Image (cartoon, grey):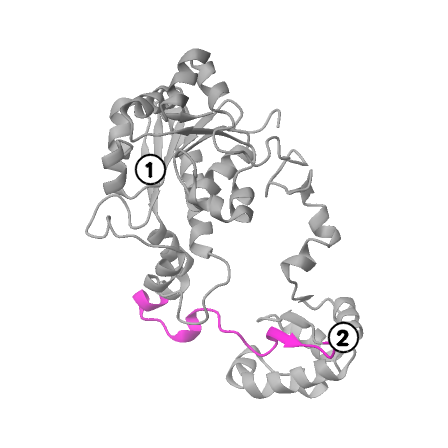
Amino acid sequence: MSGAPLDGVRVVNLSETVPGPLAALLLADLGADVVTVERPPPGDPARRFPAVFAALSRNQRSVSLDVADPRGLELLDRLAEGADVVLTGARPTTARKLGVHPDQLRARCPQACVVSVSSYGLTGPGASRPGHDLVFQAVAGLLDGPAAAVPVVDMVSGFLTALAAVAAVAGRCRDGRARTIETAMVDGALALNAFALTRELAGLPADATPVAPAGYGVYRLDDGSRLCLAVSYETHHWRALCAALDLADLAGLSFEERVADRDRIDRKLAERLRRQPADEVRDVLAAAGVPAEPVRRPADVVRTAEFAERTVGGHLAAPFRIDGRRAGAARGVPRIGRDTADVFAELGIGTAELARLADEGVITL
């Protein structure tokens, strides 16, 4: 997208699966030239799940090389020398073995900022431990209830990593100093649970964090569909709900009363919702200004007008508007190594040399 905020910024992405690639995607959507380096085929493990890989790979160039081969590592260094940011995502022991630990990258390419996202950080007793999204939900206290259907820690770690990259570029623009900024998935998980953890640290009571009252949940309608009501602490929303459903005897309840007697009130509310035709319920609540929406499946979401407005060229658009416009998918889902020849040709490596390196398994063309 011409004139995007990160036009002219080069990012080399060495990360795989979700957090680092999500950060790379967001940076690309903001205009950065993102070159994603994949291992030789089969490439990024996320390719096992085509929808996941496709969701994270737009607007990037794909280079495939074997950094375990000294010649591959040398090619990586040539690529990183012209980068503003290098994103890494390996555990520190694995990264050091491959020569792509942030300390090693900074030593060889001191002008590039390095942004690392790992499981437990680059240092400390847990640095070498493996983990996936559900593990970090567990250690951060997020599984004190149902497990989330969406890998929330993966996603928030990606957003934090993108923020770190933008901060690194901004800092270097200000004072000329390249930095290493690291985040860890466990930090992202703890940040997600900051309200509850702060409550515990401060010794505050349970009601110091939001508690769901009656009227805040998912309710089944007469046609089998489900309706999400989000009537929280606002008195006017609760009164509007009660008026719309002819529940005058409940309209005067306070938020505290709706929390204390949630089960009884919710049963009465659920019964009233089921007794009215579903279409009528939805129309009445919408007219009353009650925060209520149908619970949709992904198959339903993609057929809505509001979703269509957020797609470009058959792909989910970037989650940003820049000067009123959404960034489109300038580059679709890449095959492994789709852009290897072009990227290294820009660095002055000739066709014959690239062909030889491909024959020897160092790169994938």
How many numbered marks have been drawn onto this rendered protein structure? Answer: 2
Q: Which amino acid type corresponds to the residue marked 2 in the rendered image?
A: Ala
Going from the N terminus, do you reach mark 2 or mark 1 first?
A: 1
| Left or right, 217 with reference to 357 | right
Q: Which amino acid type corresponds to the residue marked 1 in the rendered image?
A: Ile
Dot 1: element: strand
Residue at image mark 2: 278
Residue at image mark 1: 181
Is 118 or 353 nearer to us in this picture? 353
Q: Residue at x 20, y 49 (%)?
A: 124
Q: Nearer the viewer, mark 2 or mark 1?
A: 2
Task: Quadrant for the N terminus, please.
Answer: top right
Is 110 or 215 nearer to us in this picture? 110
User: What are the residue bounds of the magenta stretch?
Assistant: 199-223
Is 325 or 106 nearer to us in this picture? 106
Q: Residue at x 54, y 25 (%)?
A: 7
Whether 113 is drawn above or below 119: the answer is above
